[in-house]
Amino acid sequence: MKDGFISAACGAPKLRLADCAYNAEQTFGLMRTAEKAGVKVLALPELGLTGYTCGDLFHQEALIRGAEEALDTVLKATRNLEVITAVGLPLRRNGKLYNCAAVIQKGRILGIVPKTHLPNYGEFYEKRWFAPAPGETEYISLLGQDAVPFGAGQVFSCDTMPGLVLGFEICEDLWSPDSPSAKMARAGAVVIGNLSASNEVLGKDAYRRQLVTMQSAKLLCGYLYSSSGAGESTSDLVFGAHQLIAENGTLLTERRFDGGLLVSEIDVQKLCAERRRTQALDEDPGGRYAAPFSLTVSPTKLTRYVSPMPFVPEGKEDRDARCREILLIASLGLKQRLEHTGAKTAVVGLSGGLDSTLAVLITGLAMKMLDRPMSDIIAVTMPCFGTTDRTRNNAVVLAGQMGATLRTVDISQSVRSHFRDIGHDPEDHSVTYENAQARERTQVLMDIANAGGGLVVGTGDLSELALGWCTYNGDHMSMYGVNASIPKTLVRHLVRYLARDSAEPDLHDVLEDILDTPVSPELLPAVQGKISQRTEDLVGPYELHDFFLYYVLRWGFSPRKVYRLAQYALGRKYSREVLLKWLKVFYRRFFAQQFKRNCMPDGPKIGSVALSPRGDWRMPSDASRALWEADLETLE
């Protein structure tokens, strides 16, 4: 439960049809296993105490009574277990029989949730035996417990973990357009369990998977789907014990054709934050009965996968598809800007580094869309004190391979003249020494664009903007920033994708060499012709900063939680001390450099994390970071 994580599980115990005593033993045995594993919420299959395929035996008094006795057995056997469990069984009420989920904890029934939507088509015939849930929640006596809530849509609220509200529905309820889970989510449920008995036919598993993940996305919730398996009748159907755990559109884990427990962790804190941010769920105007329960607050061991590079898909196919989409979005944005402004040329400062390489490649794609010659791209190299032969030559070769118009403007003398004007000693390699070069380059680009009726294409990326790793009114400024929403870790993959896609061997080779070049602004003098200034030595590894950036901006996590996730995902590569060091740098720079972001140029939004002051990120330049630093201090 620490940091908002709750351990949740689906369970599929082996059963025997109509053998309620045996099924009770299997049920409480699995509950005990879940408790030992630290599970706090457990969903079991539909009608698990009897079996789903009992058919007309559901009309038999012996089976109905046997199911109630089995529930009583489970309650007595688990009176010391804290895990909240939803158990499936048939229950009678007012002369009708209902297909129900009994939500239990510590030998107490928190509520009974009857199934709302009863399938009566194809292989399903539930209306022969069961009645749909009544319209209102009632209160019943059951197994010696009074005032037990009985009704669909009720929620269960934890009084020891803020935001943890549970809801449960049964099989067809999910498949229906009028799903009870939608009402439960509007009443606050962030973790919803589904007790199911879904048989296997070709392609149905893919449909279930899509249904569960999309429901979790629509409702901004965690969703536990637990279907029956071994022990159900195979007369006409086969049940595959399909278990799925999804969170906000992401499938965390799944299993088929195997029983036992499937465990993962739901990030309740993240789900609650996303609901606050989007305000996508209107409050249920009718309200829902909320049964309270308590859980012992304890650390939750993480088993779910946390990507060390959250901006970069790990599979080649997904990564290539993402690269194609990003390049299309960025080039379409630039195409529209060039058309709208009537720009005759697109001016790009080409340094031979990754960012400017990506910017000129995107510009080339935009020119193709406009059916304009590549010569309308003016690639400007501006060597100065730190420029190496390697980067300068790569810039020249790249421009030539693309067919761009190459201009070389050596700014060394202009910068020295500027030093004399302001009284700066050229031997003083302070920030003034560096920024003077960056601002001179921007002045050159802007004036070249003015002279030719052109538009300056910016090269700075999202990671640099987050850290403020740009010179104010220098490389910070352009007329359209095509890389502004692309994080550094993704820039590399985009360039590599275009290199691999290139039909020209020379273009491929120069892009590969650029990929192998250390990231550097090249503002300090080279040493023996090699780059002396490496960005990641100064501000930290970009894979760390992109990790921090994703969880700080996209989800609003606290420094403590970001640090914990970084240890979990990147702890084998970086020590705790290194992670904490660069996390402190991230927060310090992020807060201090907001003034640069508040006046950044236009640029196309690419993903869910963006820093445009006109779109996703509105923050005062003088906000204090004291609260975040105080949280960081507790980690030392």
Image (tube, rainbow, N blue to C red):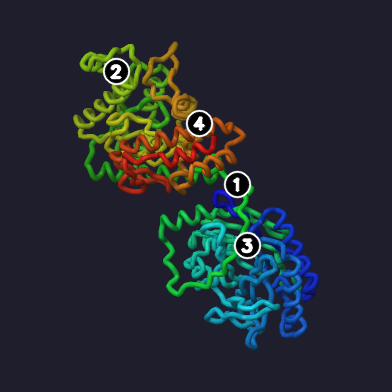
Looking at the rendered image, the disc whose residue lies closer to the viewer, 1 or 4, is 4
Query: Residue sitting at 21 percent across and 31 percent down?
Result: 452
Please state which amino acid type lies under the numbered disc 2: Asp
Looking at the rendered image, the disc whose residue lies closer to the viewer, 3 or 4, is 4
Query: Residue sitting at 36 percent across and 46 percent down?
Result: 617
Question: Where is residue 376, by image quadrant?
Answer: top left
Q: Which residue is mark 3?
A: 205
Q: Which residue is mark 2?
A: 410
Label 2 crowd (10 A; few <14 / some 14-19 / many >=20): some
Quadrant placement of the C terminus: top right
Tag 4 and tag 2, C-beta contact below 8 Å: no
Q: Secondary structure at mark 2?
A: loop
Q: Which residue is mark 1?
A: 305
Please state which amino acid type lies under the numbered disc 4: Lys
CA separation, marks 1 and 4? 24 Å
Query: Residue 129 location, x and y as percent?
Result: 67, 83
Please state which amino acid type lies under the numbered disc 1: Tyr
Query: Residue sitting at 56 percent across and 75 percent down?
Result: 152
CA separation, marks 3 and 4? 46 Å
CA separation, marks 4 and 2? 38 Å
Q: Is residue 61 above or below residue 468?
A: below
Query: Residue 104 location, x and y as percent?
Result: 66, 68
Q: Which residue is mark 4?
A: 581
619 sits to left or right of 570 = left
Label 4 crowd (10 A; few <14 / some 14-19 / many >=20): some
Looking at the rendered image, the disc whose residue lies closer to the viewer, 1 or 3, is 1
